[in-house]
Amino acid sequence: MATLGVIALLCASVALTHAYNARHEVRKFPDGFLFGTATASYQVEGAWDADGKGENIWDRITHTNPDHIMDKSNGDIADNSYYLYRRDVQMMRELGLDLYRSSISWTRILPSGFPDKINEAGVQYYNNLIDELLKYNIQPMMTLYHWDLPQKLQDLGGWANPEIVTWYADYSRVVFKLFGDRVKYFITINEPYLVCNSGYGGDKLAPALNSTGIGEYMCAKHLLLAHAKAYHIYDDEFRPSQKGKIFISFSAQWYEPISDSAADVEAAHDANQFEWAQYSWPIYSETGDFPPEMKKRIAARSAEQGFPRSRLPEFSPEEIELVKGTSDFFGLNHYTTNQIYRNASVPQFNVPSIEDDLGVGSYTPIEWQLSETSKTKYVAWGFTKLLNRIKDAYKNPPVFITENGIGTRDGMNLIDDDRVTYYRGYLDALLDALEDGCDVRGYTAWSLMDNFEWTDGYTTRFGLYEVNYDSIYRTRTPRKSAYVYRELLRSRSLDHHYEPDLTQPLTIAPGH
Ligand code: BGC
């Protein structure tokens, strides 16, 4: 017993020393690790109907139902990056970025959604942005779909219509042809879970269909097939000459069991399966298809509810093969962690719905919130656990962190200490994962600057740069976190004690 006690004490002291070191030593990132920032077209571009751009589902929902957005705002002007992109690139030079992730607005390129007519002004805008980035050695990383579906395609059912596989494939070919000579990183789709769950199964994001328990699963199948088609088009027709990378970005939070009871452990596992493995398992696992636990639960609930077959559509054997292996990186958008417990009968769940199919409850302790105005819960260890789970589940694939950041509700505030704490903690957790052998290749912080935060409008801010929405110039000013990020990129290391001199302007970083 005494020996056991000594061992326990030793282990505790090793763990404490590790945590202490993690916070006090200067930790280096590996050579070649890439750093950037991320944004998305609808959230920053504005110019919603300029120069021939067609209407998308976010134009439609914000114009017809302003109450859907917390401050009744929209992305009509947003950060006005359509006109201010040079200032954006200047900010990236101040930060010293290796790359910039943003997205292409489908209707700016193809106003009708179909490739019958290419909008030259839209093409010119992306050419200008890409060329400006490359001029300063900043690699563009372009997402083809970050939630702004052409309204005309939505009128035909959007992601619930199987034809979208072809519509999206056609669009992707146009994009590769136009920009692939210079863009070497393409992301097919941003956060399938949010697209399908909040837009089709739920009513938070456009098109807000609220077809619970049905729409999200139809969307999931077509979205994965569309992604896979685009991947193969790139692989067959463009990769040989363009030599880039193409992948998909999953939203993956970490779901931690609230207790070590078998029921809660299984519940947390299911929650991880339903959120992100729903999309990553078909691509990364050896069996392909949706995760087996998920298929089983939905089939069982569907049968109980009187459906003649599972509400989760099946993939044919050919479709399973088409989807398998179609991602050069595991694109990961990660923000936070939830505690999970088994709860099969939560009364507020719709029946049928994905929440009811999953049957778990979640809880986040108040201590996980950094302050009253910080919205994203700070649970850095969850990031390390998630990265290790990806490593173990999928034979250590190369991972690219395509989003990570904290939302705050403190309005205009340049001294954003919560954001500094968050980034330092999460980057420390990432370094822990690298030490564990996880193959993470790069990181783009969300976000370069404040922007239209979907249903939160402009009430929640994520920017390293603050944007002044009261000014027609949409003035951008670096926050304390921008200074800290710049130093991190300069030194390629994490130093918790670095205190920037905020009286000095952020000038262009050397080499940019
Ligand atoms: C989305 C971004 C969004 C961010 C912060 C992600 O889910 O991809 O568009 O702004 O989270 O909420």
Image (cartoon, rainbow, N blue to C red):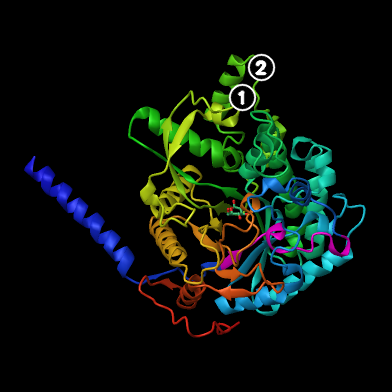
Q: Which mark is residue 106?
A: none
Pick whichever, 149 or 291, lies toward us.
Answer: 149
Q: Amino acid at mark 2?
A: Phe
Residue 294 visible at all: yes
Q: Amino acid at mark 1?
A: Pro
Where is the C terminus found, in terms of image quarters?
bottom right
For numbered disc 1, what is the local secondary structure? loop
Mark 2–mark 1 contact, CB under 8 Å?
Answer: yes
Where is the N terminus found, in terms of image quarters?
top left
Q: Position of residue 501 (x, y in %)?
A: 44, 82
> How many marks can you see?
2
Q: Which mark is residue 352?
A: 1
Q: Residue drawn 38% across and 58% down?
A: 432
Q: Position of residue 347 (x, y in %)?
A: 51, 24
Residue 47 in magenta? yes
Pick whichever, 348 or 37, lies toward us.
Answer: 348
Q: Residue drawn 71% across and 36% down?
A: 209
The magenta segment is 36-52
Q: Position of residue 202 (x, y in %)?
A: 64, 36
Which residue position holds label 2? 307
Does residue 300 appear left or right of residue 59 in this picture?
left
Q: Is residue 203 above or below residue 121?
A: above
Residue 378 figure quarter: bottom left
Q: Residue drawn 44% across and 67% down?
A: 420
For numbered disc 2, what is the local secondary structure? loop
